[in-house]
Image: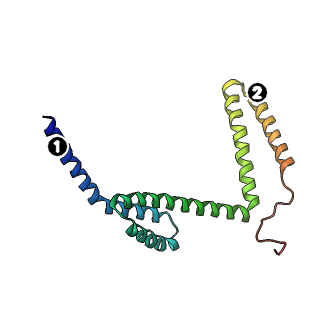
Amino acid sequence: MVFLMKVLAAALGRFLADELKEWCPSLTDSLIKLAVRRLPQDLQERYAEEWRAHIVDTPGEIGKLVCAIGILWAGWRIWEALRVERLRSLVEKFPNIVYFVARVLMTVSFLAPIAYLSRKYLTHNAIFLVSAVASALVALVWALETPKDVKPKIGSSTGK
């Protein structure tokens, strides 16, 4: 009985290994397509060609699958770096808008808990008083912390 179980396990293992070997090319191609899809249009063809050539040079089917998983991760990292760079360039072009949005978000995050707690625990007149004081505090903070000369940083003015 034990011998029969061992033979059955070996046959099943061989079957699963053959199936995995047959599925590996399709899986690696799908992973490369997924990695390339996140990139900008002008880079997609170039990276797809480079990554497919790298997969062809990798020995073994499992090695190719592992390499394709690494390529998927690399594609995500490239996409993330490009996204951060685009956001950074927008912040450099429009610092006043970014500053305004940040201040609005900080104001809302300051006033939202006050509004919730005052509605839950205070009367109508007290709610008005608390909201007026909170709004006055926010206006004071805005007036004191508004930068006088926020200018976009486009290029270098020193000529270096």
Sequence-earlier tag: 1 or 2: 1
Residue that carries the numbered disc 2 in the rendered image: 126
- Closer-to-camera residue (65/79): 65
As drawn, 1 above or below 122: below
Give the x, y percent position of residue 87: 65, 61
Lateral position of residue 148 relative to residue 46, left or right: right
Residue depicted at x 54% and y 59%: 77
- Could you say which quadrant of the image residue 61 lies in? bottom left
- For this orientation, the residue located farthest to the front is 3
Residue depicted at x 52% and y 74%: 42
From the image, which quarter does the C terminus lie in? Answer: bottom right
Crowd around label 1: few <14 · some 14–19 · many ≥20 (10 Å): few
Lateral position of residue 89 relative to residue 139, left or right: left
Question: Which colour style is shown?
Answer: rainbow
As drawn, 58 above or below 160: above
Residue that carries the numbered disc 1 in the rendered image: 8
Kind of residue at disc 1: Leu
